[in-house]
Amino acid sequence: MKAMILFPLLAALAVWWMGRRDTSRDPRLTGLAIALLALLPVLLLLPKIPLLPPAIVETGPGEPPAGWVHGVLAVWLAGCGIGWIRLGLSALGLARWRRQSILVDRIAGTVEIRELAGLRGPVAAGVFRKMIFVPPGWHAWGEETRDAVLLHELAHHRRRDPLTRWLAAFACTFHWFNPLAHWMRRRLILQCEQACDEKVVATGVRADEYAEILCRFASHRPLPVAGLAMAEKSSLETRVRHLMAPSRSKGFSILAVLAGFVLWGALLLALLGPKTETGVQPDVEEINLRLSADPFPADQP
């Protein structure tokens, strides 16, 4: 239980420290933290290494040991169940999008372009079946706009960002009670978008023109878990500011140190633990009865 609280705190601290000046640094660290968050419940099931001082838990006769733990576990499992239901509904929503859309093109033989009514802008989605959903009027866009849109959405698939988004949602089902886990999920999604923005600008697209395209397609429509809209209103200002700011060095040495800190923190919190010894609290009445009893009852007349 302590690891479920302490590790998100350590991971969020590392993610914040890496991006304290620039939120785009570094999606690999945030992805590692999210992956470890998802694996932490499994790591907690591994045998503990008894390096810490032993803890003695005293329980009275006939009393269940630490009964409150069962209540906390039940609440946690209920929250996880609600999260799993939401993930399932999101998967069904993505499948419904695929059925309602029309296949209009295929890029590189693997990524499908599908027209879907009701969309304001393009959306990259799908893990095993890669898709880019576009509004019906996408043919009327200018050539430069279409190229920028496809570059951005293809960058999502090359980076496997839909899978990353699923993993982040999966981690938050286990840590639904922890706001730090949800904060890291939002940070990771933002960093994925900024990384794709950098890919587009690196091809020669002017940053100010690309920022105008983002503002044009900004949407606040709820998306499936694995869907990534080209622009969402909640993160639009941050992305535009990042495009207009000068590029900064990613600082690989700092990334390596913080990644090692997060990785070893997860392992130590999950595997190290005290050797618990359970003792039974003595019954005072029974002790007094034994002390007052006649040791030689046969000698009594």
Image: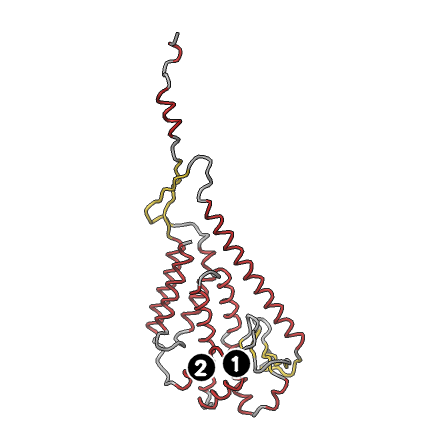
Is 293 drawn above or below residue 96 in the view shown?
above
Mark 2 residue type: Glu
Left or right relative to 66: residue 77: right
Question: Measured from the top left, where is residue 74 in percent x and y?
Answer: 51, 51
Question: Measured from the top left, where is residue 82 in percent x and y?
Answer: 55, 60
> Residue at 42% of width from left, 73% of height from top?
27
Other-residue count near label 2 (Cα within 10 Å), few / some / many at <14 / 14–19 / ≥20: some
Q: Quadrant of the C terminus?
A: top left
Q: Secondary structure at mark 1?
A: loop
Give the image quarter of residue 117.
bottom right
Q: Tell me the tag on residue 60.
A: none
Mark 1–mark 2 contact, CB under 8 Å? no
Q: How is the image coloured?
A: secondary structure
Q: From the viewer's side, name the closer residue of 151 and 290.
A: 290
Left or right relative to 17: residue 146: right
Give the image quarter of residue 256.
bottom left
Q: From the viewer's side, name the closer residue of 203 and 143.
A: 143
Question: Measured from the top left, where is residue 248 in percent x and y?
Answer: 35, 81
> Residue at 37% of width from left, 30% of height from top?
284
Q: CA distance from mark 1 to mark 2?
A: 13 Å
> Residue at 44% of width from left, 82% of height from top?
237
Q: Secondary structure at mark 2?
A: helix
Question: Measured from the top left, where is residue 128 in percent x and y?
Answer: 58, 71
Q: Nearer the viewer, mark 1 or mark 2?
A: 2
Instruction: Report the number of numbered marks.
Output: 2
Q: Tell me the tag on residue 237.
A: 2
Other-residue count near label 1 (Cα within 10 Å), few / some / many at <14 / 14–19 / ≥20: many
Closer to the chain start, of discs 1 and 2, is 1
Is 294 drawn above or below residue 183 in the view shown?
above
Mark 1 residue type: Met
- Give the residue number, with chain letter if any, for mark 1: 230
